[in-house]
Image: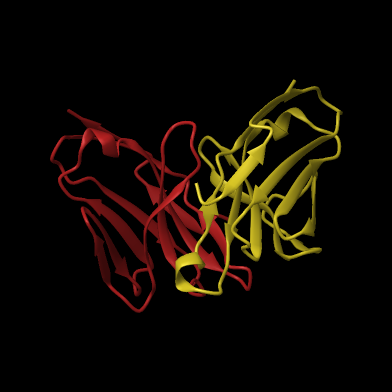
Chain colours: A red, B yellow
Amino acid sequence: QQQVKQSPQSLIVQKGGIPIINCAYENTAFDYFPWYQQFPGKGPALLIAIRPDVSEKKEGRFTISFNKSAKQFSLHIMDSQPGDSATYFCAVRSGSARQLTFGSGTQLTVLP
Amino acid sequence: DAGITQSPRHKVTETGTPVTLRCHQTENHRYMYWYRQDPGHGLRLIHYSYGVKDTDKGEVSDGYSVSRSKTEDFLLTLESATSSQTSVYFCAISDPGKPSTDTQYFGPGTRLTVL
């Protein structure tokens, strides 16, 4: 079953634009909602994460907005740069071993 | 990378042969995970480990087995590789002991091709 639905699949923005990537989940038992950034040939790296008792979190140019009632969370990238071009994955966490279930990914391209 | 190495980094093998991938960590994290990454599917959990000799199945465990005989090493074995197991495999670690480690950190990946 697909517990996390991520959209869009791909996104192209101009430098300085604000790309927004969305994720929707189905289960209310998740306790942690991270976003990972992955460059070609590399492993995913944690970008930013939020817990369900908070509606928004900012770290530098990256912001997570969390809507618990709608079971949705999104990543906003302010003042996007060509170096932000990467694949972004949302994830949800559950289970005693803190297992992650990932969205299918969004390939972001920021044009110079 | 958070002290995680994977070996080999690339491997080409033939259908029906056994394959073992190794994940090695120097962080002394309690939990370790194996994922596979395929286009359109994100990362999917294969197996994970709570600790030494303590493992469990993930979402896509069929055709895979794991072993963890010591904290730092987590092995993923394909007993008889099939073409559907062609993928990029990632190892991850985490430890709930403190907030800074209570998230998953990923290794560099192993690209496996089964002909």
- The residue most toward the front is B26
- The residue most toward the bottom is A53
Classify residue B82 as left or right of residue B39.
Answer: right
- Residue B91 in the image, given as x and y percentages of width and height: 62, 48
Q: Nearer the viewer, residue B95 or A64?
A: B95
Q: Nearer the viewer, residue B76 or A71?
A: B76
Q: Is residue B29 above or below residue A19?
A: below
Classify residue A5 as left or right of residue B104.
Answer: left
Classify residue B102 as left or right of residue A80.
Answer: right
- Residue A28 in the image, given as x and y percentages of width and height: 48, 74
The quarter of the rendered structure image containing the N terminus of chain A is bottom right
The quarter of the rendered structure image containing the C terminus of chain A is top left
Q: Is residue B98 above or below residue B72?
A: below
Q: Is residue A38 above or below residue A78?
A: above
The residue depicted at 86 percent of the width and 28 percent of the height is B16
The residue depicted at 70 percent of the width and 26 percent of the height is B11
